[in-house]
Structures are given as C-alpha cells and as structure tokens.
C-alpha cells in the first residue's frame, strides 16, 4: 500500500527566506506527483504536476523535483511572502483501477512579515 | 467554466439522519472522486468513478453510497449519519490521461451531533 509522508508538519519562516518542503512515498510505481495548496476553509489548488518521467517542474517562484528511485519529492519556494502562508499537500497517483491519488498529511506553512 | 461545484458548504446533522452531498463539474471529466479530510490529516478517498454508470470503493467507503448517472454529477449519500462522519468533504475531478490534473471543489463541512 502506498504511503505518503510530509515533513515537517508545520513550518514558520521570516519573509524573504527560501524554503524546502519535503514529501516521501513508499512505492515508486507512480504515474505522477502533484503539489497542492490549501488555504484555511478552502479547497485544494493544484500548483505543480510532475510526470513519472520528469525530474522537475517550475512555476514562478515554485520548483518541484521528483526522485522516483528514492521515493522523494521537494517543493522549493523562493523568496517567500506572507501570501504563501497555507497548507501544502503532495499526492502521488498510483497505478490502479481508478488511478487514485494518495495524499500526504500536509505541511502548514506560515511566512511572517 | 465553474469547475467543480459542491453544495451545501455547511451542514449539521443529528445522529441517524440522512443527507446527500451534491457535486457537479462542467469540464466533461470522466474521473470523479470523493475525499474526506479530518483535522490535521491528509485526504482519504471514499468513492470514485471512472465514468457514468461506473463507481468503486476507495479507502474509507463504509457508511456512504454514490451514484453516477451522468458525466457531470457525482452525489455522495450518507444514510445513517454518525459522529465519526464529522469531517470536511471534497469532491474532485480530472480528465482521462496521464497528465490529468485534479480539480477540487470548495468542500462541504459536515458536523454530526
């Protein structure tokens, strides 16, 4: 059974700092990996999707990397801003009948002005 | 496009009551999912559907039922509400294919008292 772990569970940084969020998964047989952002009381918004054949994806100040062999992904946020404060979740899409996503527990990020 | 629309946003039920959470999407996506999210936890898959007329169980299906009579709609039914079903429920959809991103609704916060 695929298990996804995100460490740390919570992170507080000063504005302007570069930071890395970590995601690990137990089974490397994945289609892809997605990073999501969730604001309090809201749904999830997809940030980046990395296919299993790719090593990284970039969008603005965000860069996500994928190392399937080691079962790890990182989300790099450059020059963090208070508006980046949210919970970040990673999810892996596995090979099964419904191509279901398995989610990590999330990292709650607070960027202080 | 409205994307994925969920109703209601909030609901309080008494133990033993029944209700249906509505979900509709206007993106012509074949795949639809119901997740629940408990405080501080990741998302757990309840049921999913790969197309109209086809549904299957996820990780935590007990106490729930679904139907998929059209591509657009994927309602989730709670027959006999229990306190353990207090949670935030998210509906999601994605297109067919390896690169399909997952799109989420804004969620339904349900309390069973």
Image: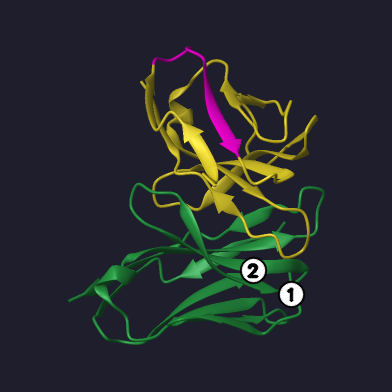
Q: Position of residue B83 (x, y in %)?
A: 43, 25
Along the viewing direction, whichever of B21 and A60 lies nearer the viewer: A60
Query: Can you tell which chain is drawn yellow?
Result: B
Q: Chain of mark 1?
A: A
Q: Quadrant of residue B108?
A: top left
| Colouring method of the image | by chain
Point out the stretch of residues depicted in magenta. B14-25
Q: Quadrant of the N terminus of chain A?
A: bottom right
Q: Chain of mark 2?
A: A
User: Per the image, is B80 magenta?
Assistant: no
Q: Secondary structure at mark 1?
A: loop
* Residue at position x 46%, y 81% in the image: A60
Residue contact at pointers 2 and 1, CB within 8 angstroms: yes
Q: CA distance from mark 2 to mark 1?
A: 7 Å
* Residue at position x 74%, y 60% in the image: A94
Q: Please say whether residue A47 is visible from this viewpoint.
A: yes
**Which badge, 2 or 1, is on the more N-terminal residue?**
2
For label 2, the residue is A33
Along the viewing direction, whichever of A62 and A104 lies nearer the viewer: A62
Identity of the residue furthest to the front in this view: B1
For label 1, the residue is A52
Q: Few, some or many C-alpha atoms within 10 Å of disc 2 (few <14, some 14-19, many ≥20)? A: many
Dot label at residue B53: none
Q: Position of residue B48 (x, y in %)?
A: 70, 40
Q: Secondary structure at mark 2?
A: strand
């Amino acid at each position: 059974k695929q298990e996804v772990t995100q460490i740390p569970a919570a992170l507080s940084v000063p504005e302007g700092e570069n930071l890395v969020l970590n995601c690990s998964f137990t089974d490397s047989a994945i289609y892809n990996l997605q990073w999501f952002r969730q604001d309090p009381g809201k749904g999830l918004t997809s940030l980046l999707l990395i296919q299993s054949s790719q090593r990284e994806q970039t969008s603005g100040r965000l860069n996500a990397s994928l190392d399937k062999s080691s079962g790890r992904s990182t989300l790099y946020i450059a020059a963090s801003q208070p508006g980046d404060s949210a919970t970040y979740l990673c999810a892996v899409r596995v090979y099964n009948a419904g191509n279901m996503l398995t989610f990590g527990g999330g990292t709650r990020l607070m960027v202080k002005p | 496009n409205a994307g994925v629309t969920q109703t209601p946003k909030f609901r309080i039920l008494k133990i033993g009551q029944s209700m249906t959470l509505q979900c509709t999407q206007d993106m012509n996506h074949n795949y639809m999912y119901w997740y629940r999210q408990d405080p501080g936890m990741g998302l757990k898959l309840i049921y999913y559907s790969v197309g109209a007329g086809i549904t299957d169980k996820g990780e935590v299906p007990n106490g729930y039922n679904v139907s998929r009579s059209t591509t657009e709609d994927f309602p989730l039914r709670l027959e006999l509400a229990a306190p353990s079903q207090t949670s935030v429920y998210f509906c999601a959809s994605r297109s067919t294919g390896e690169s399909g991103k997952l799109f989420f609704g804004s969620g339904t916060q349900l309390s069973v008292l």
